[in-house]
Each structure stands twice: as C-alpha cells, then as structure tokens.
C-alpha cells in the first residue's frame, strides 16, 4: 500500500479542513454563543443601556464625560471614553507627556474642589487601562461632595447619602474594590435635585 499523497491531494484535504473549521469555529460557534448570550443575559448583551422614558441615558459599562459643577466627574480617559477606541495611553510613568497631563489634571482638580494635591485620590489623576472605566473610588466621589451640593442647592448630607446608596462593594466580599458608577450617581442626582 502506498500512503503518499500528491501535492494537489494534500492541498485539497487541507483546504477542506480549513473550510470545515471556519464553518464550525467562525460561524456555528460564534452564532450559537451570541444567541445563547442574548437569551440568557439580554440586558448585558445589549450593552447594559439605561433608558428613562424611552430615552437612552447611557451604559453602566462605559464611562461618559460629565462636566459642570453640578455633576460628579469620572476618571481621565486616554480614549476620550470612546468604546470603539478603548485602550490606555501606554505612556510610562517617566514619560514627560504623562507627567504634564497628570500635573495639569491635579491643578484643575485642586482649583475645582478646593483641596490640596495630597488629598486627590489617584483614580482622578490616572486613566484606566480600558479608557472607558465608568467607576471611581468612593474617596474620589467624596471629594466632589461640596462642589456638587453647592451647585445643586442641596445639603452635603444628601449628596453623601446618594454616594453611599450607589457604592458597589467587593464581589463576594473579596474581589475588587468598592466603587461608584459615575453615570448612576449623576442620574441619581438628576432625580434628587433636577437642574
């Protein structure tokens, strides 16, 4: 028996195998996992979008830019909070561009919040690795209480309670850090004291 195959026979066997794997892995698997995800987790599969009175207000998974004294501000973003361009800046701590941006952000936060640089939580200076992190630390939210309360005309205690109500704790008590979703916090502010 001769087990050697010609080049053309080997080529067509390889081609059939590639097409089979493309159909199985690229089409059948992808379609079935996507369909299963949409059936089991419809809210997450559609981007965890928050809607209010038929209007989409944002996604709890993707940061948005908030400006103005009456809103909590999130982390800086190397991607301008664009979910189609996620990623960090990849600048090393020794990079002068990063240092200049951090100093400028620090100065702006000091002026806006009326605090010293030593009291600024690091997450308000450092961008997240994804560039679209929707969370800040409770400490980062707390340094913004006075400004937000003043701008909204409500008490600092009400704003502090809103932060406490929107603080997500560690998962199962051990994973991650306590965090506050900026979108949910600002939507809560709009309900508490409309602008």
Image (tube, rainbow, N blue to C red):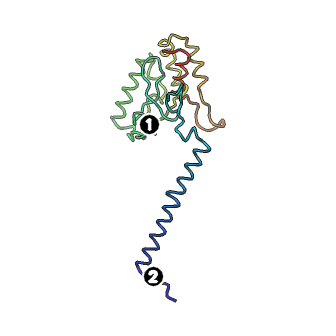
Give the camera-side residue of 138 and 54.
Answer: 54
Q: Which residue is mark 1?
A: 131
Residue placed furthest toward the front:
54
The location of residue 59, given as percent across then percent down, is 51, 33
Q: Residue 40, how many percent across, how many down?
A: 62, 44
Q: Residue furthest bottom?
A: 1
| Front-most of residues 142 and 86 | 86
Secondary structure beneath disc 1? loop
Q: Nearer the viewer, residue 141 or 60?
A: 60
Question: Is residue 177 placed above or below 114 in the rendered structure?
Answer: below
Label 1 – label 2 distance at C-alpha: 53 Å
Q: Is residue 158 above or below residue 86?
A: above
Residue plotted at (50% across, 84% down): 3
SS label for mark 2: loop
Q: Earlier in the sequence, mark 1 or mark 2?
A: 2
Which numbered disc covers residue 5? 2
Q: How many neighbours does mark 2 have within 10 angstroms: few (below 14), some (14-19), or many (20 or more)?
A: few
Residue extending farthest to the right is: 172
Q: Residue at x 56, y 51 (%)?
A: 33
Q: Position of residue 24 (x, y in %)?
A: 53, 61
Q: Quadrant of residue 167?
A: top right
Do residues under tags 1 and 2 come within 8 Å of each other at their CB atoms? no
In front: 68, or 124? 68
Q: How many marks?
A: 2
Q: Quadrant of residue 79?
A: top left
Nearest-to-viewer mark from 1 and 2: 2
- The residue shown at (51%, 10%) is 153
Residue 3: image tag: none
């Amino acid at each position: 028996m001769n087990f050697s195959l010609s080049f053309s026979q080997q080529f067509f066997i390889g081609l059939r195998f590639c097409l089979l794997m493309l159909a199985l892995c690229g089409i059948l698997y992808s379609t079935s996992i996507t369909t299963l995800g949409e059936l089991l987790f419809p809210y997450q599969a559609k981007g965890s979008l928050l809607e209010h009175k038929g209007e989409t207000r944002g996604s709890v998974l993707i940061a948005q830019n908030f400006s103005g004294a009456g809103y909590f501000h999130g982390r800086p973003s190397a991607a301008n909070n664009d979910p189609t361009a996620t990623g960090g800046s990849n600048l090393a701590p020794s990079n002068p561009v990063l240092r200049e941006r951090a100093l400028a952000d620090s100065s702006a936060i000091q002026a806006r919040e009326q605090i010293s640089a030593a009291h600024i939580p690091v997450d308000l200076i450092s961008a997240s690795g994804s560039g679209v992190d929707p969370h800040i630390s409770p400490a980062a939210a707390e340094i913004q209480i006075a400004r937000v309360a003043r701008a909204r005309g409500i008490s600092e205690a009400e704003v502090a309670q809103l932060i406490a109500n929107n603080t997500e704790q560690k998962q199962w008590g051990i994973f991650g850090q306590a965090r506050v979703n900026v979108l949910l916090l600002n939507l809560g502010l709009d309900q508490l004291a409309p602008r």
